[in-house]
Image: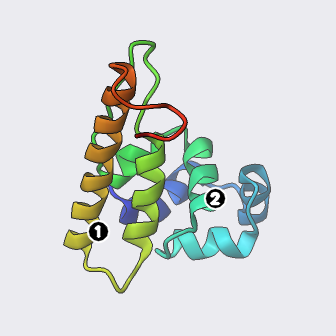
Amino acid sequence: MTLLRLGALLRERRGGRGIREVAKEIGVSPATLTRIEAGRLPDLLTFRKICAWLKINPADILGIPTQQGSDNVVVEEAPSQAAVHLRADQALPPAAASDLAQLIVFAHRELARRIREGLADVSTGI
């Protein structure tokens, strides 16, 4: 699953239902939904709404591996959000966006590990 497939996933899930009806259900404008179905990349808030409506993990769309916490909560949400912005930047080559997204994921994991082990302060991350 890729970010470029998001429009197709929306069309498949929408089926024969109207754009206005589904856009209202998702919480976006019909014009926005039409643009995304046509292949345009959404902004971060819209992306989150669409993923929630599709019942999919944003990390799956972005191709970012997720790590499950001890309570089965995905701990990669913040890096996934950053990756949306990176991959939506058309001036940034896709390989660079992917590399930067991975860097954010690894940095986030390291910070979480340090906090868990008492090596970093939760409020500052230092």
| Residue type at the position of mark 1 | Ala
Q: Position of residue 5 (x, y in %)?
A: 38, 61
Is there any visible trace of residue 8 in the rendered image? no
For residue 57, above or below residue 8: above
Q: Position of residue 20 (x, y in %)?
A: 78, 64
Q: Residue at x 55, y 36 (%)?
A: 123
Compute the Cα span from label 1 to label 2.
Answer: 19 Å
Is there any visible trace of residue 24 in the rendered image? yes
Q: Tag 1's secondary structure?
A: helix
Which residue lies under the disc numbered 2?
Answer: 45
Which residue lies under the disc numbered 1?
Answer: 97
Q: Position of residue 13 (x, y in %)?
A: 55, 49
Q: Residue at x 50, y 76 (%)?
A: 40
Marks 1 and 2, the one that precedes in the sequence: 2
Q: Position of residue 111 (x, y in %)?
A: 35, 37
Which mark is drawn over residue 22?
none
Q: Tag 2's secondary structure?
A: helix
Most extreme residue toward the top is 71
Left or right of 106, for residue 85: right
Estimate how packed mark 1 is, as few (under 14), some (14 to 19) or many (20 or more) residues with alpha carbons within 10 Å. many
Quadrant the C terminus occupies: top left
Left or right of 99, for residue 90: right
Q: Residue at x 25, y 79 (%)?
A: 93
Out of 46 and 40, give the one closest to the viewer. Answer: 46
Q: Residue at x 54, y 56 (%)?
A: 10
Out of 31 and 98, give the one closest to the viewer. Answer: 98
For residue 36, above or below residue 18: below
| Residue type at the position of mark 2 | Leu
